[in-house]
């Protein structure tokens, strides 16, 4: 059986790296959405949806971490 310390490190990396990648994606999408909304206010809904989409990556990372934790 794998050492539970290594599983904990893997779970932490799964959440941490996906959170970092999501933050970088949201930064770029958010700034582009704000720029688009300054020219056309009707783009608020699309900008909001596009800003939230990268957050699903973190949810996938959390699911992987939970699955790793359950296999300890």
Image: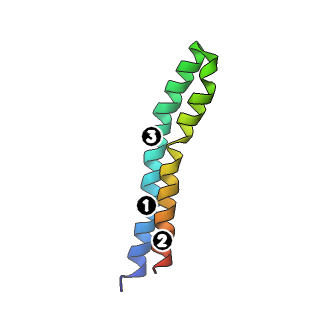
Q: Is residue 15 above or below residue 10?
A: above
Residue 67, labelled with which disc? 2
Question: Which quarter of the picture shows residue 24?
Answer: top left
Disc with the residue nearer the chain's start (2 vs 3): 3
Residue 14, labelled with which disc? 1
- Name the spot of residue 52 as percent of width and height, x first: 56, 40
Q: Please state which of residues 29 and 6 is positioned toward the viewer in this rendering.
A: 29
Q: Secondary structure at mark 3?
A: helix
Measure the C-alpha gap from mark 1 to mark 2.
Answer: 11 Å
Callout 1 crowding tier (Cα within 10 Å): few <14, some 14–19, many ≥20: many
Tags 1 and 3 in contact by the CB under 8 Å rule? no
Q: Secondary structure at mark 2?
A: helix
Tags 1 and 2 in contact by the CB under 8 Å rule? no
- Name the spot of residue 63 as percent of width and height, x first: 50, 63
Residue 64, labelled with which disc? none
Q: Residue at x 53, y 35 (%)?
A: 50
**Residue position for label 3:** 24
Q: Residue at x 43, y 46 (%)?
A: 21
Disc with the residue nearer the chain's start (1 vs 3): 1
Callout 3 crowding tier (Cα within 10 Å): few <14, some 14–19, many ≥20: few
- Name the spot of residue 37 as percent of width and height, x first: 59, 20
Disc with the residue nearer the chain's start (1 vs 2): 1
- Quadrant position of the N terminus in the picture: bottom left
């Amino acid at each position: 059986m794998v050492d539970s310390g290594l599983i904990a490190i893997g779970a932490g990396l799964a959440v941490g790296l996906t959170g970092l990648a999501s933050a970088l994606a949201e930064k770029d999408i958010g700034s582009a959405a704000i720029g688009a909304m300054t020219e056309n206010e009707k783009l608020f809904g699309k900008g909001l949806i596009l800003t939230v989409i990268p957050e699903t990556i973190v949810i996938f990372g959390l699911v992987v971490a939970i699955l790793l934790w359950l296999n300890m």
